[in-house]
Image: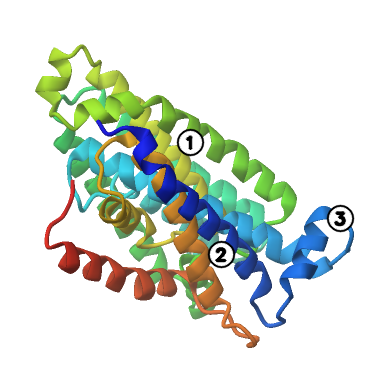
């Protein structure tokens, strides 16, 4: 494993870039705000409603979403030793989508009064959380009876297919207005959280990050293969359980509060490995945190369409901007580091 001192310079640069992107994200929008005004608002000498109640929470949400999805993607790729694994391979996002579909599209089966009573911001968050939790519970029950890690990956994909099928049935019986509302939720959004909602989001996110940090040693050992990891004394089942729960806390909470954000969880670990050539998770984890947050802030700044009143779907921007970057990095390096 590489000496962490070797990577001090890249981490300093990434931290400075993150701070710059953070201020740029707050500054850009339908109304441009000077950096000086942002700084004065942050230290409390100026009271700016737009900064304090809209742009600042949105910027923090972007940091949590980008870093959380990046880390959960890294955990899944290491656990399954599969470069195509992402934070949603366990069916967590599909479970959240099913919960939201039952609330938004449920009126197609249960009647309009049912939908009117249930649809609200918190009901959607709770429904998404419950959907994610139930799928997680099913995966955990199955994983306790299965020895092969790859079998868990396949089972997660099957759960995703089942929930997608149920959503399709609900969509068939729903009106165009309900379908539109569900599709808009599927676009993802970073700008809908208040400070109180962001606080709840941060608490659950912190638990996921803490469990990810605890699993660093296990992740490094798993890179050597499960059989070799066992010979080194690693408790495979316990490590696998911690990694799955950490991923579920991060990906499930992000989906519940911000919607299903595409691409970030799959691509950020690859971008990080190409930028910082290492397989040591003690270095990779904080690097993924920084790069995930930076990429998400950049994508959100572009989605805001500065000087315009329009905002593009964040999901579209993450894929349109990020996918070519990954392709370019892989072509430039000529090999995938894993």
Q: Quadrant of residue 51?
A: bottom right
Q: Which residue is mark 3?
A: 44
Q: Position of residue 66 (x, y in %)?
A: 47, 55
Q: Which residue is mark 1?
A: 209
Residue at the image point whose x is 17% and y is 14% from the top: 232
In this view of the protein, which residue sits in the foreground, 24 or 172? 24
The reply to whether residue 138 is visible in this rendering is no
Q: Is residue 302 above or below residue 168?
A: below
What count of labels does the image hold? 3
Q: Is residue 68 above or below residue 229?
A: below
What is the C-alpha distance between the residues marked 2 and 1?
22 Å
CB under 8 Å between discs 2 and 3: no
Q: Position of residue 190 (x, y in %)?
A: 58, 63
Which is nearer the N-term, disc 2 or disc 3?
A: 2
Q: Regarding mark 3 in the picture, which secondary structure is present there?
A: loop
**The disc label shown at residue 21, or none:** 2
In this view of the protein, which residue sits in the foreground, 27 or 67? 27
Which is nearer the N-term, disc 2 or disc 1?
A: 2
Screen quadrant of the N terminus? top left
Would residue 185 appear left or right of 243 to someone viewing this image?
right
What is the C-alpha distance between the residues marked 2 and 3?
21 Å
């Amino acid at each position: 494993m590489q000496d962490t001192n070797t990577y001090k310079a890249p981490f300093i640069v990434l931290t400075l870039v993150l701070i710059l992107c953070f201020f740029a994200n707050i500054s850009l929008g339908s109304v441009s705000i000077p950096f000086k005004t942002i700084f004065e608002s942050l230290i409390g000498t100026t009271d700016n409603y737009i900064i304090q109640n809209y742009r600042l929470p949105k910027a923090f949400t972007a940091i949590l979403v980008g870093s959380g999805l990046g880390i959960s993607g890294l955990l899944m790729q290491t656990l399954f030793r599969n470069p195509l694994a992402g934070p949603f391979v366990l069916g967590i996002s599909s479970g959240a989508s099913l919960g939201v579909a039952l609330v938004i599209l449920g009126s197609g089966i249960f009647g309009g009064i049912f939908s009117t009573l249930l649809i609200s911001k918190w009901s959607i968050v709770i429904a998404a959380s419950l959907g994610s939790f139930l799928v997680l519970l099913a995966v955990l029950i199955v994983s306790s009876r299965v020895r092969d890690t790859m079998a868990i990956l396949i089972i997660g994909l099957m759960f995703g297919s089942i929930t997608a099928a149920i959503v399709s049935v609900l969509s068939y019986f729903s009106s165009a207005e309900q379908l539109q509302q569900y599709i808009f939720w599927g676009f993802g959004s970073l700008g809908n959280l208040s400070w109180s909602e962001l606080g709840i989001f941060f608490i659950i996110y912190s638990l996921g990050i803490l469990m990810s940090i605890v699993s660093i040693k296990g992740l490094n050992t798993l890179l050597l293969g499960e059989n070799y990891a066992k010979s080194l004394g690693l408790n495979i089942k316990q490590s696998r359980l911690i990694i799955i729960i950490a991923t579920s806390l991060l990906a499930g909470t992000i989906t519940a509060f911000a919607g299903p954000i595409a691409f970030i969880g799959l691509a950020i670990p690859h971008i990080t490995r190409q930028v910082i050539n290492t397989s040591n998770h003690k270095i990779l984890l904080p690097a993924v945190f920084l790069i995930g947050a930076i990429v998400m802030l950049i994508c959100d700044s572009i989605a805001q369409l500065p000087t315009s009143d329009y905002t593009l779907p964040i999901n579209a921007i993450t894929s349109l901007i990020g996918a070519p970057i990954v392709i370019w990095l892989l072509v430039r390096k000529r090999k995938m580091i894993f």
